[in-house]
Amino acid sequence: MNRKPMFITIEGGEGSGKTTMVGRLAAYFQNHSIPYLITREPGGIEIAEKIRSLILDPSHTEMDARTEALLYAAARRQHLVEKVEPALANGLTVLCDRFVDSSLVYQGLGRGIGMEEVWRLNQFAIEDRMPDLTLLLDLDPETGLSRIAANEEREYNRLDMESLEFHRKVREGYRQVAQRDPERIRIIDASRPPALVEKELIRALESTVLKGF
Protein backbone atom coordinates (compact mmCIF):
# COMPACT_ATOMS: atom_id res chain seq x y z
CA MET A 1 0.00 0.00 0.00
CA ASN A 2 1.28 3.46 -0.89
CA ARG A 3 1.75 5.64 2.13
CA LYS A 4 1.90 9.39 2.06
CA PRO A 5 4.93 10.62 4.03
CA MET A 6 3.90 12.67 7.04
CA PHE A 7 5.58 15.40 9.04
CA ILE A 8 4.97 14.72 12.73
CA THR A 9 6.35 16.79 15.60
CA ILE A 10 6.51 16.10 19.31
CA GLU A 11 6.44 19.01 21.74
CA GLY A 12 6.43 19.60 25.47
CA GLY A 13 8.14 21.36 28.34
CA GLU A 14 11.37 20.33 30.00
CA GLY A 15 11.23 16.82 31.43
CA SER A 16 7.99 15.88 29.67
CA GLY A 17 9.50 12.70 28.22
CA LYS A 18 9.91 13.64 24.58
CA THR A 19 13.17 11.74 24.11
CA THR A 20 11.69 8.55 25.57
CA MET A 21 8.58 8.78 23.44
CA VAL A 22 10.52 9.51 20.26
CA GLY A 23 12.32 6.21 20.77
CA ARG A 24 9.07 4.33 21.31
CA LEU A 25 7.46 5.86 18.24
CA ALA A 26 10.52 4.92 16.19
CA ALA A 27 9.98 1.32 17.28
CA TYR A 28 6.32 1.60 16.24
CA PHE A 29 7.30 2.80 12.76
CA GLN A 30 9.79 -0.05 12.43
CA ASN A 31 7.25 -2.66 13.51
CA HIS A 32 4.73 -1.35 10.97
CA SER A 33 7.24 -1.05 8.11
CA ILE A 34 6.75 2.70 7.83
CA PRO A 35 9.84 4.38 6.33
CA TYR A 36 10.81 7.15 8.74
CA LEU A 37 13.39 9.68 9.85
CA ILE A 38 13.99 10.88 13.41
CA THR A 39 15.43 14.35 13.89
CA ARG A 40 15.41 17.23 16.33
CA GLU A 41 15.41 21.00 16.75
CA PRO A 42 17.53 22.90 17.11
CA GLY A 43 19.96 20.56 15.40
CA GLY A 44 19.67 17.56 13.14
CA ILE A 45 22.33 18.81 10.71
CA GLU A 46 25.81 20.26 11.15
CA ILE A 47 24.93 23.95 10.80
CA ALA A 48 21.89 23.71 13.08
CA GLU A 49 23.83 21.72 15.68
CA LYS A 50 26.41 24.51 15.81
CA ILE A 51 23.63 27.04 16.32
CA ARG A 52 22.19 24.78 19.02
CA SER A 53 25.47 24.87 20.91
CA LEU A 54 25.39 28.67 20.84
CA ILE A 55 21.81 28.91 22.06
CA LEU A 56 22.00 26.35 24.85
CA ASP A 57 25.47 27.11 26.19
CA PRO A 58 24.96 27.92 29.91
CA SER A 59 27.69 30.56 29.73
CA HIS A 60 25.72 32.66 27.24
CA THR A 61 23.61 34.36 29.88
CA GLU A 62 23.83 37.72 28.10
CA MET A 63 21.96 36.49 25.02
CA ASP A 64 19.10 38.82 24.09
CA ALA A 65 15.64 37.26 23.71
CA ARG A 66 15.29 38.43 20.10
CA THR A 67 18.76 37.16 19.26
CA GLU A 68 17.70 33.79 20.65
CA ALA A 69 14.51 33.79 18.57
CA LEU A 70 16.44 34.67 15.42
CA LEU A 71 18.97 31.89 16.03
CA TYR A 72 16.21 29.31 16.51
CA ALA A 73 14.56 30.46 13.28
CA ALA A 74 17.86 30.28 11.40
CA ALA A 75 18.54 26.75 12.64
CA ARG A 76 14.97 25.78 11.77
CA ARG A 77 15.27 27.07 8.22
CA GLN A 78 18.49 25.22 7.44
CA HIS A 79 17.25 22.02 9.06
CA LEU A 80 14.00 22.22 7.10
CA VAL A 81 15.55 22.67 3.67
CA GLU A 82 18.53 20.39 4.21
CA LYS A 83 16.92 17.48 6.03
CA VAL A 84 13.15 17.56 6.56
CA GLU A 85 11.96 18.49 3.07
CA PRO A 86 14.30 16.05 1.28
CA ALA A 87 13.20 13.23 3.58
CA LEU A 88 9.53 13.90 2.89
CA ALA A 89 10.23 14.11 -0.84
CA ASN A 90 11.89 10.68 -0.61
CA GLY A 91 8.82 9.14 0.99
CA LEU A 92 9.94 9.14 4.63
CA THR A 93 7.64 10.04 7.49
CA VAL A 94 9.54 12.58 9.59
CA LEU A 95 9.28 12.64 13.38
CA CYS A 96 10.88 15.82 14.72
CA ASP A 97 11.56 16.63 18.36
CA ARG A 98 10.32 20.26 18.45
CA PHE A 99 9.42 22.66 15.65
CA VAL A 100 7.86 26.11 15.35
CA ASP A 101 5.49 25.69 18.33
CA SER A 102 8.51 25.66 20.64
CA SER A 103 9.55 29.12 19.49
CA LEU A 104 6.03 30.45 19.90
CA VAL A 105 5.90 29.39 23.53
CA TYR A 106 9.52 29.63 24.72
CA GLN A 107 10.43 32.92 23.06
CA GLY A 108 6.97 34.31 22.37
CA LEU A 109 5.45 33.83 25.81
CA GLY A 110 8.32 32.64 28.01
CA ARG A 111 10.65 35.46 26.94
CA GLY A 112 7.82 37.94 26.51
CA ILE A 113 8.51 38.83 22.87
CA GLY A 114 4.96 38.07 21.83
CA MET A 115 3.64 34.97 20.11
CA GLU A 116 2.45 36.86 17.02
CA GLU A 117 5.84 38.52 16.59
CA VAL A 118 7.63 35.18 16.82
CA TRP A 119 5.13 33.63 14.42
CA ARG A 120 5.80 36.30 11.80
CA LEU A 121 9.54 35.72 12.12
CA ASN A 122 9.13 31.99 11.69
CA GLN A 123 6.79 32.28 8.73
CA PHE A 124 9.80 33.63 6.83
CA ALA A 125 11.80 30.59 7.92
CA ILE A 126 9.29 27.81 7.27
CA GLU A 127 7.18 29.36 4.49
CA ASP A 128 4.05 27.17 4.31
CA ARG A 129 5.47 24.03 5.92
CA MET A 130 3.62 22.97 9.06
CA PRO A 131 3.39 19.55 10.70
CA ASP A 132 0.58 17.22 9.74
CA LEU A 133 0.30 16.27 13.41
CA THR A 134 1.81 17.61 16.63
CA LEU A 135 1.88 15.45 19.74
CA LEU A 136 2.03 17.69 22.81
CA LEU A 137 3.23 16.06 26.03
CA ASP A 138 1.59 18.08 28.79
CA LEU A 139 3.17 17.99 32.25
CA ASP A 140 3.29 20.39 35.17
CA PRO A 141 6.70 22.09 35.33
CA GLU A 142 7.43 21.02 38.90
CA THR A 143 7.26 17.35 37.90
CA GLY A 144 9.23 17.94 34.72
CA LEU A 145 12.05 19.76 36.48
CA SER A 146 12.24 17.10 39.17
CA ARG A 147 12.63 14.46 36.45
CA ILE A 148 15.49 16.45 34.95
CA ALA A 149 17.20 16.78 38.33
CA ALA A 150 17.04 13.01 38.77
CA ASN A 151 18.47 12.28 35.30
CA GLU A 152 22.25 12.49 35.59
CA GLU A 153 22.76 11.60 31.90
CA ARG A 154 20.82 14.57 30.53
CA GLU A 155 22.79 17.54 29.22
CA TYR A 156 22.67 20.68 31.34
CA ASN A 157 21.73 23.69 29.19
CA ARG A 158 20.74 27.33 29.48
CA LEU A 159 17.03 26.54 29.71
CA ASP A 160 17.68 24.61 32.91
CA MET A 161 18.71 27.91 34.51
CA GLU A 162 15.29 29.47 34.01
CA SER A 163 12.84 30.05 36.84
CA LEU A 164 9.82 27.93 37.61
CA GLU A 165 7.67 30.86 36.51
CA PHE A 166 9.31 30.76 33.08
CA HIS A 167 8.43 27.08 32.68
CA ARG A 168 4.88 27.76 33.83
CA LYS A 169 4.58 30.34 31.05
CA VAL A 170 5.85 27.74 28.59
CA ARG A 171 3.14 25.30 29.63
CA GLU A 172 0.50 28.01 29.31
CA GLY A 173 1.87 28.90 25.89
CA TYR A 174 1.52 25.33 24.69
CA ARG A 175 -2.07 25.25 25.88
CA GLN A 176 -2.76 28.44 23.96
CA VAL A 177 -1.34 27.15 20.68
CA ALA A 178 -3.25 23.88 21.14
CA GLN A 179 -6.49 25.81 21.52
CA ARG A 180 -5.76 27.71 18.32
CA ASP A 181 -5.06 24.59 16.27
CA PRO A 182 -6.92 21.65 17.83
CA GLU A 183 -7.04 19.66 14.57
CA ARG A 184 -3.25 19.51 14.38
CA ILE A 185 -2.20 19.47 18.04
CA ARG A 186 -3.15 16.54 20.26
CA ILE A 187 -2.59 17.04 23.99
CA ILE A 188 -1.23 13.97 25.77
CA ASP A 189 -1.17 13.68 29.57
CA ALA A 190 2.53 13.02 30.23
CA SER A 191 2.15 12.56 34.00
CA ARG A 192 1.15 8.91 33.56
CA PRO A 193 3.44 5.87 33.27
CA PRO A 194 5.38 5.74 29.96
CA ALA A 195 3.43 2.74 28.66
CA LEU A 196 0.14 4.63 28.94
CA VAL A 197 1.61 7.74 27.34
CA GLU A 198 2.94 5.62 24.48
CA LYS A 199 -0.46 4.00 24.00
CA GLU A 200 -2.19 7.35 23.66
CA LEU A 201 0.46 8.66 21.26
CA ILE A 202 -0.03 5.66 19.01
CA ARG A 203 -3.81 6.05 19.19
CA ALA A 204 -3.41 9.67 18.07
CA LEU A 205 -1.23 8.56 15.17
CA GLU A 206 -3.55 5.82 14.05
CA SER A 207 -6.66 8.00 14.24
CA THR A 208 -5.21 10.88 12.24
CA VAL A 209 -2.29 10.98 9.83
CA LEU A 210 -1.71 7.21 9.73
CA LYS A 211 -5.39 6.31 9.38
CA GLY A 212 -5.85 3.67 6.75
CA PHE A 213 -2.20 2.63 6.54
Image (cartoon, grey):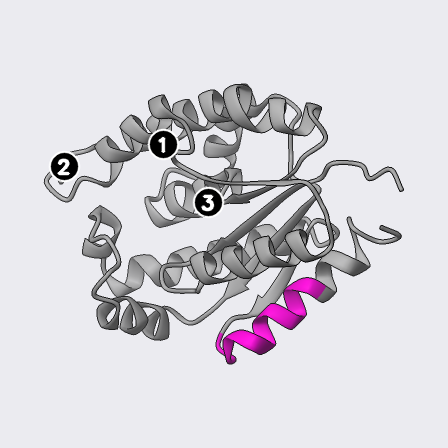
Identify the mark nearer the N-term, 1 or 2.
2
Residue 91 in the image: above or below residue 164:
above
Identify the mark nearer the N-term, 2 or 3.
2
Which amino acid type corresponds to the residue marked 1 in the rendered image?
Ala
How far is mark 3 from mark 1, CA to CA? 10 Å
Can residue 197 be found in the magenta stretch? yes
Residue 8 in the image: above or below residue 152:
above
Q: What residue range appears in magenta? A: 191-202
In the drawing, does residue 203 fall left or right of residue 60?
right
The residue tagged 3 is: 102
Q: Where is residue 54 in the image (x, y as percent from the top left)?
A: 22, 31
Which amino acid type corresponds to the residue marked 3 in the rendered image?
Ser
**Tag shown at residue 17:** none
Q: Viewer-nearest of labels 1 and 2?
A: 2
The residue tagged 1 is: 69
Which amino acid type corresponds to the residue marked 2 in the rendered image?
His
In the drawing, does residue 136 fall left or right of residue 52?
right
Q: Where is residue 206 in the image (x, y as percent from the top left)?
A: 78, 59
Q: Which residue lies furthest to the bottom in this view?
A: 193
Of residue 186 and residue 119, the one placed in the foreground of this image is 186
**Tag shown at residue 60:** 2
**Residue 3 is drawn in which quadrant?**
top right
- Residue drawn 56% across and 76% down? 195
